[in-house]
Structures are given as C-alpha cells and as structure tokens.
C-alpha cells in the first residue's frame, strides 16, 4: 500500500474494485486493524485508529464490523448463536461462554434473522447452510454489533449470481435503512456499478480511480483490470433487478 488518501463520508456505500492482488483486502484489514500499518494514519471521528490498543481497539472493531469472503462462522454452532457472537463486546464473557446470552441479545439476533428471511434457520447448524445463507448470517452478525461502518471483503466471491444479488441487496438495505457506511471490495463491475455510490479503483496497492459509477468508463475499467476486464463483468444484467428483502429491524431495537 502506498499513497492511499481517502475520505469516506458518513452513510456512503463505497465499492473498492480492481484485479486480484491490487490491495483491496489489505486496505480493509488495515482499517479494521487486523493488519498493521507501517506508516500513515487512519482517522475516524477525530480518533487515530492506528494508535488504538486494548479495550479501545476492541471498541473500534465493534464499531467497524467485518464481513469476510469465507463467512468465518462456527460451523458446529447454530445460526442464532453465530449471530449473537456479534454481541460479545456488549455481553459478559463468562455468561456467553456458558450459553447464557441476555434475552435482549437473543431477541435482537432473531429479529435480524427474520428480516433477512432466514429466521426459520435459527436452530440449524451453520455448516449445513448454503453459501448464500451463510453470508447472510455473517452480515446479520455484523449488524447486531451496532456498527457505524461495515467492511465487506469480497462478500459475493464464492456465490452464484442470484445469491450475489441477494447479498448485495442486503448490504444496500442496511446502508439505506440505518445510514451505516459500507466499504465493499468487489470483483464484479456490474455489482459495483449497480449498488455503490462511489467506486475506488486500486492497482498495485495504489488508488488509480476515485469517482462515481458513471465516471468509470470502459477504458478506465480496462486499465484497472487488463485481461480480466471481461471476467469482471460477470453478472447478467437481468439478474441485477431489485429483489425485495423486507424492512430491516427498526433502529430503536438495535441501538
């Protein structure tokens, strides 16, 4: 990473695009402090995120939720428990180790699952779900953290086109309903153009494009992706039609 200078406005949906190895995942991991920076500064609300330690760092990771490409669920645990893991920073450690989750945490987690249309899967082991279902569970876990920003690292990479649309629609509704900022790494240009307000193109660890989806010309996309350009346009347009997911949990119930 070098010479990366970005400001993300509250409530925005930013897509980070570029070929494999461009630095997209590294950028998100640095923001969340899963990977250390060697120089530079990451600021949020006047705080120097790069200087946080201990409890302050754990607090930041609660505010800045991660959604991973490989879901990072505990396969042997049921869906509801996996979602409640997003409440660990707010619940007592010993009680949760014993499975004694506060009733409010259970209610919040189940309500989010219901609104994601997977409430019927609450008692099922995570390892028995489809990829699309697992990713929605992972997003539900991120939402119950009550974050101010969600970092999604290639959330559709291992999904078929239809499930990719469902996952992006879910992130879009979280952004619109709660005003939560989302930074999402994407390989598919069609998905990025359809759901993101702003696109940041990366190559070799540097930002080489920063603008609206409309400003990303075919020439600019070809420069970003090279021979991968056609592969990046991988989701048929008819698959990108809006898919209703219902109304998300009211703000008052997760705040």
Image (spheres, rainbow, N blue to C red):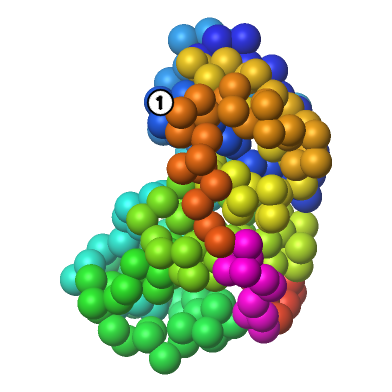
User: Up-down: is 28 above or below 42?
Assistant: below
Residue 107 visible at all = no
Point out the residue furthest to the left here.
76
Magenta part, dominant SS:
loop
Q: Position of residue 107 (x, y in %)?
A: 53, 83
State the quadrant of the C terminus: bottom right
> Is 58 situated left or right of 7 in this image?
left
Residue 137 visible at all = yes
Q: Residue at x 36, y 56 (%)?
A: 158
Q: Residue at x 46, y 28 (%)?
A: 227
Instruction: Please identify the quarter of the rendering in which residue 130 is found.
Output: bottom left
Q: Residues within 10 Å of mark 1 (few under 14, many from 20)?
A: few
> Is 92 situated left or right of 9 in this image?
left
Q: Total marks drawn?
A: 1
Callout 1 secondary element:
loop
The residue nearer to you, when weighing 146 against 139, is 139
Q: Residue at x 57, y 16 (%)?
A: 206
The residue nearer to you, when weighing 47 against 120, is 120
Q: Position of residue 151 (x, y in %)?
A: 55, 45
> Is 31 situated left or right of 118 in this image?
right
The magenta region covers 237-246
Q: Position of residue 115 (x, y in %)?
A: 59, 82
Q: Residue at x 56, y 61 (%)?
A: 236
Name the residue that disc number 1 marks. 21
Q: Position of residue 77 (x, y in %)?
A: 24, 73
In the rendered image, residue 129 lying in the magenta stretch gets the answer no
């Amino acid at each position: 990473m070098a010479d990366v200078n970005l400001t993300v406005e509250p409530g925005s949906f930013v897509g980070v695009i570029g070929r494999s190895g461009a630095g997209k995942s590294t950028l998100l991991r640095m923001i969340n402090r899963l990977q250390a920076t060697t120089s530079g500064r990451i600021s949020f609300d006047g705080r120097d995120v790069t200087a946080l330690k201990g409890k302050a760092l754990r607090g930041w990771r609660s505010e800045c939720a991660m959604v991973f490409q490989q879901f990072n669920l505990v396969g042997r645990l049921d869906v509801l428990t996996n979602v409640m893991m997003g409440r660990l920073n707010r619940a007592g450690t010993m009680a949760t180790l014993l499975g004694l989750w506060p009733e409010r945490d259970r209610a919040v987690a189940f309500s989010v699952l219901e609104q994601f249309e997977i409430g019927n899967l609450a008692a099922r082991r995570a390892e028995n779900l489809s990829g699309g279902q697992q990713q929605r569970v992972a997003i539900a876990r991120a939402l119950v953290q009550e974050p101010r920003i969600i970092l999604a690292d290639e959330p559709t990479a291992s999904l078929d086109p239809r499930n990719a649309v469902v996952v992006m629609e879910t992130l879009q509704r979280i952004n619109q309903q709660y005003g939560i900022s989302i930074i999402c790494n994407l390989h598919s240009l069609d998905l990025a153009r359809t759901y993101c307000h702003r696109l940041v193109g990366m190559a070799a660890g540097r930002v080489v494009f920063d603008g609206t989806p409309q400003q990303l010309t075919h020439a600019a996309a070809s420069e970003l992706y090279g021979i991968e350009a056609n592969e990046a346009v991988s989701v048929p347009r008819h698959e990108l039609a809006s898919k209703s997911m219902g109304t998300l949990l009211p703000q008052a119930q997760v705040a």
